[in-house]
């Protein structure tokens, strides 16, 4: 997954909704022998439909399709060639947007095959467009087709407006970040260097070897001005030995992750709060140096803009590093993980929005799920409803919801007293149906009608 400094697996999604467990009446998926089935297997089955996971032919093991990202070292000549190639691909994208609107208004179909034919005619009319690689331009059309089909599908399915993918828009020269995709016949690796179609040669910082021959590569530049090569390749899953230990994870704001074992809690790092002063300094510099609309940006404004982007990126790297190390520690020491199916957007409308965003709950959740998929752990996502009202020891449910200020759960049925979030984490282990060898006094059978007095 993570090679160099970045990972792209999180962009594809991993189908965690398929392993959702309801608090009442829900049943854990069973295998043919009647035992609880591994929900990581369900995640992989959904991922196979998404193109992330594919079974190895003739073996019982699995193969994962992942992205390995590396830094690029470019000469000035290579960067000029890449930017010229990006300008051609951006022109092709904008032409696709224009033709798509025209054909949609005319009631005609607009697919990649038709746009490919028009690209052939366009390359013969414009010599400067023909100087670029046809592979990169055709992949631009494929990317446009995938984006447009997703937008059309959301409209046909009447998806909520907050979840709809918008139709592709124009890519402006000063706003769009360069991103060029090459298939296998558009690039090659020779002598540790990356050769692209069109005579572009790039130096790659090989922080780790590729597990297999890549099938495609995407060349991109981030907001900090750094160039990256992201290879799509296949690698085998790396299953870890069974430990027969279970753990529950409850997401929060004061502690990003509270588990049934406090040794594996993830405290709030406050990286955003630490870097806020430097970030505000650079943003004030941008505000002072901003020119009126229509006037080109000054070099001093671009410098302040780059410093702002670097400040943001530094906080993001720290946050990702913390969550990745925590997820690896949890996965290496437990083979059964029950995770709260928490939506971080829920906190975005509360008074805790800034602190919740600084914590990176979604990032930690994605890293944990990916680590479970990678190492073959049994991870199950549990519905969080009533987890703060249920008792993890006797299963009784309180009649009234606990106020947020009350951080200790006291069961009036059995007298159990535990920290609120740790009780919720233990309830998730019980709902997931795990054998809690590593969890202290947790009932597996959840009563369906009991309530505390």
Image (tube, helix red, strand yellow):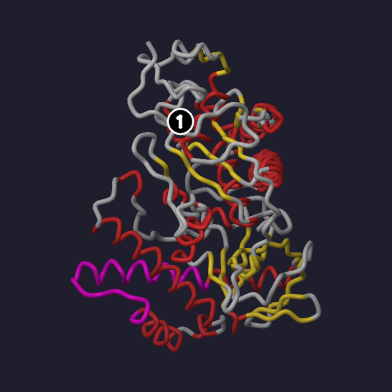
- Residue 239 is situated, as x and y percent measured from the top left of the image, at 67, 58
Which one is nearer the viewer's eye here, 258 or 253?
258
Residue at x-position 44% and y-position 66%: 49
Which one is nearer the viewer's eye here, 418 or 162?
418
- Residue 130 is situated, as x and y percent measured from the top left of the image, at 52, 85
Residue at x-position 65% and y-position 67%: 236
Question: Is 93 on the left or on the right of 71, as rendered?
Answer: left
Which one is nearer the viewer's eye here, 318 or 41?
41
Find numbered disc 1 in the image and state the secondary structure of the residue it sits on.
Answer: helix
- Residue 176 is situated, as x and y percent measured from the top left of the image, at 52, 57
The residue stretch that appears in magenta: 88-114
- According to the picture, the residue beneath numbered tag 1 turns out to be 348
Which quarter of the figure is the C terminus placed in?
Answer: top left
- Residue 155 is situated, as x and y percent measured from the top left of the image, at 26, 56
Relative to residue 92, is residue 397 depicted above or below? above
Relative to residue 171, is residue 109 depicted above or below? below
């Amino acid at each position: 997954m993570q090679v160099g400094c970045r990972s792209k697996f999180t962009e594809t999604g991993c189908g965690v909704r398929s392993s959702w467990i309801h608090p009442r009446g829900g049943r854990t998926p069973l295998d043919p022998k009647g035992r609880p089935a591994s929900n990581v297997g369900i995640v992989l089955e959904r991922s196979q439909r998404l193109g992330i996971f594919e079974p190895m032919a003739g073996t019982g093991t699995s193969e994962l399709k992942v992205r390995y990202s590396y830094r690029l070292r470019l000469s000035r000549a290579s960067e000029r060639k890449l930017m010229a190639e990006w300008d051609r691909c951006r022109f092709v994208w904008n032409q696709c947007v224009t033709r798509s609107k025209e054909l949609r208004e005319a009631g005609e179909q607009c697919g990649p095959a038709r746009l490919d034919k028009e690209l052939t005619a366009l390359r013969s009319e414009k010599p400067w467009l023909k100087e670029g690689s046809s592979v990169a331009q055709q992949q631009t059309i494929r990317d446009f087709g995938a984006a447009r089909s997703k937008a059309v599908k959301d409209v046909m399915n009447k998806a909520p407006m907050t979840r709809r993918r918008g139709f592709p828009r124009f890519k402006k020269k000063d706003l769009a970040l360069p991103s060029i995709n090459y298939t296998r016949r558009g690039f090659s690796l020779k002598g540790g260097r990356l050769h692209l179609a069109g005579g572009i040669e790039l130096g790659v910082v090989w922080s780790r070897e590729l597990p297999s021959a890549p099938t495609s590569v995407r060349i991109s530049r981030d907001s900090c001005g750094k160039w990256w090569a992201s290879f799509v390749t296949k690698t085998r899953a790396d299953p870890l030995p069974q430990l027969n230990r279970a753990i529950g994870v409850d997401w929060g704001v004061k502690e990003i992750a509270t588990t049934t074992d406090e040794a594996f809690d993830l405290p709030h790092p406050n990286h955003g709060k630490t870097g806020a002063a430097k970030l505000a300094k650079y943003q004030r510099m941008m505000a002072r140096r901003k020119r009126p609309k229509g006037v080109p940006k000054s070099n001093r404004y671009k410098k302040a803009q780059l410093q702002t982007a670097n400040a943001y990126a530094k906080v993001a790297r720290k946050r990702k590093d913390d969550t990745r190390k925590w997820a690896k520690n949890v996965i290496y020491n437990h083979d059964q993980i029950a995770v709260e199916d928490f939506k971080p957007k829920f906190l975005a409308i509360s008074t805790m929005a800034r602190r919740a965003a600084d914590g990176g709950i979604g990032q930690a959740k994605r890293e944990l799920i990916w680590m479970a998929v990678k190492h073959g752990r049994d991870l199950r996502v549990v519905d969080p409803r009533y987890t703060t009202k249920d008792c993890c020891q006797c299963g009784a449910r309180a009649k009234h919801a606990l106020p947020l200020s009350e951080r200790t759960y006291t069961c009036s049925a059995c007298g159990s007293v535990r920290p609120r979030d740790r009780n919720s984490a233990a309830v998730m282990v019980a709902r997931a149906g795990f054998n809690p060898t590593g969890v202290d006094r947790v009932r597996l059978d959840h009563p369906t009608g009991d309530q505390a007095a």
